[in-house]
Image (cartoon, rainbow, N blue to C red):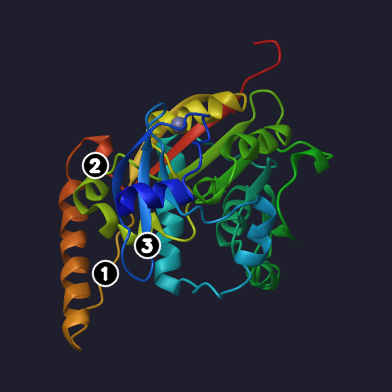
Amino acid sequence: MNKTGQFIKDHDFPCWCGQSESRVICGQVFGRRPFLVLECAGCQTHRILPKALQTQASAEVMYNEYEPPDLSAPASEQFINNMWQRFGETQVQFTKGLKVLDVGCGNGILLDKICEKFGCIGRGIDVDERRIAKARAHSKYADFECGLFEGTKVREKYDVVVSSAVIEHVVDPVGFLKQLNMALPDDGTLFLLTPNARSLTYRLLRSWWRDLLSIGEHIYLFTPKSLELCAQRAGFKLVKTSFGIDKFSPKIRVNGFRDALITFWTVYREMVKRVSSRFAFATTHDILYAHFKKVGSGA
Ligand SMILES: [Zn+2]
């Protein structure tokens, strides 16, 4: 058996959809940090080997091990502006008095801004204790809780559930969405944001799409269709999908060969991103987001 075959034998796991058949998309089985990305033959979701987490409970340990960097003030503002645009594109509406739950809220800045701008009542939950401590310190409008979200513990339903950049980290995506489903009434709104496995940048760069592959953290990368399928299994129907990119200014470094290589790839990637974002095709964009509604029991 060759090295790739052996790596798959050692690390593969079935897709969330139940299918085990797959094909290799990219990766490297040599070096310090070997990994492989496989595409499910059934639903086309990509999965990253080795699996970043074995159980969801271990996320509480893993995401408290390192301190994630905070966004600078201008980057934060850009992020919030991007999010208003994304909610608009997918027809997610916030109105005064709506109860909003943010699962994986990080430092709570988005939830706080939603509450400030629209007069919503917000609750945020995240496994990262330090981020929750920051959220509690800075937020004027929302409450925060540290831990894994459990739908069975929800006493009062929410009108809107937002979960941004979380589902790609989750061991059991259908189970996770079922938990979110429990927090909503019939027709309640769910907004999900995740890397787009159909992105042109990804198809060109493959294993160099490092920031969105996030080896060691991400487990699944969804296509627009596979995200919809996953949500359907958890009792949601699609309202609208849209796509975007996160623009960033590459840091130019010149200190040896490795830096030169990193700079080359950073600039190249940024060019691909900027060029691809000019096309009207949704599949050219790095980030996928969608608005779902909970299917009513009578439907
Ligand atoms: Zn699958």
Which circle, 3 or 1, is nearer the viewer?
3
Tell me the quadrant of the picture where the C terminus can be found: top right
Horizontally, is 161 left or right of 44 in the view? right
Mark 2 sits near ligand 1, with its Cβ under 8 Å away: no
Element under disc 2: helix
Nearer-N-terminus badge (3/1): 3
Give residue 183's mark.
none
Q: Earlier in the sequence, mark 3 or mark 2?
A: 3
Q: Position of residue 60 (x, y in %)?
A: 68, 61
Residue at which label 3 appears: 34
**Vertical position of residue 42 compared to residue 109: above or below:** above
Cβ of mark 3 under 8 A from ligand 1: no
Left or right of 68 in this view: 213: left
Residue type, numbered disc 1: Ser
The circle drawn on residue 284 is 2
Q: Is residue 75 above or below residue 277?
A: below
Q: Mark 1 and mark 2 in contact (Cβ < 8 Å)? A: no
Q: Which quarter of the frame holds ligand 1?
A: top left
Res. 119 in view: no
Residue 179 locus on image (x, y percent): 69, 37
* Front residue of this view, candidates 50 and 166: 50
Residue 136, image quadrant: bottom right
Using the rendered image of the protein, determine whether residue 248 is visible from the camera's viewpoint.
Answer: yes
